Amino acid sequence: MADAKPPDIADLDLGARVEAQLRFLVAIDALKHVQRRNLTIDGSRLENSAEHSWHLGLFARVLAEHSLAPVDVDRTVTMVLVHDIVEIDAGDTIVYDTEARAAKLIEERAAADRLFALLPLDQATVLRQVWDEFCAGESPEAELANAVDRLQPLLQNFLTGGQRWRDHGISAERILAVNAPVTDAIPEFGVILRRIVALASKQGWLPEDDGDGAP
């Protein structure tokens, strides 16, 4: 019926804790609709932030052995799964637009306040701490999480022929300046970054001067 009340989690009569958990999980479904600036590796379309977060979970799981310090891999996987949920409210910002990224911090913290508060207090506290840890980037787990967050789009851009870099005129110097401080925390990732940039430069994908910014 057209005038029927839309279904709601409360209709399931599950109890306060499970209802709160499901409301959070339903709310973060919106991350599937946040479009990122990177192409999927087959070059057919732009990826979304939920796909990106899933991919990072496997990046962290597979590549954790390259961290110089021992890491809690489960904590790192949790970190990358929640790191971008704030984009539901704040949207995605290209990594090379440093001014926009800085300006968005207030919006992201407000989004974190709203989204994590949907959970029961104990889980809200733990996941918010993990999100804050990612933002600080200081623990071995956060260093790994931030490094794979940069490595994944670098690989995507490289494997799609530098299309998005070429679309926006991103230079080799800019890629290194923005990504090296993060990827160098895991030396093997720093090697990958420099080889990607060297090969992309050799192919003529990267101009000498930056354009207007890119993913």
Image: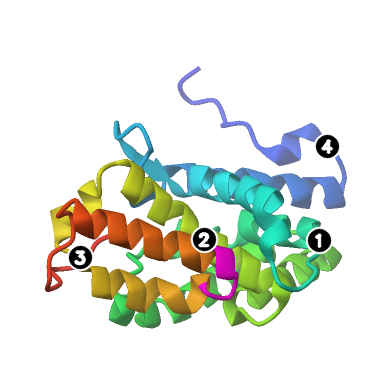
Mark 4 or mark 2, earlier in chain: 4
Mark 3 or mark 4, earlier in chain: 4
Q: CA distance from mark 1 to mark 4?
A: 16 Å
Judged from the image, the secondary structure of the residue bearing numbered disc 4 is: loop
Q: Nearer the viewer, mark 3 or mark 1?
A: 3
Where residue 10 sits in the image (x, y, percent)?
A: 74, 41
Mark 3 or mark 1, earlier in chain: 1
Mark 1 or mark 2, earlier in chain: 1
Query: Which numbered circle lies on residue 13?
Result: 4
Query: Which numbered circle lies on residue 55?
Result: none
| Marks 1,2: beta carbons within 8 A | no
Q: Amino acid at mark 4?
A: Asp
Q: Amino acid at mark 1?
A: Pro
- x 18%, y 61%: residue: 206
Judged from the image, the secondary structure of the residue bearing numbered disc 3 is: loop
Horizontal placement of 176 versus 138: left or right?
left
Q: Mark 3 highlights which residue?
A: 170
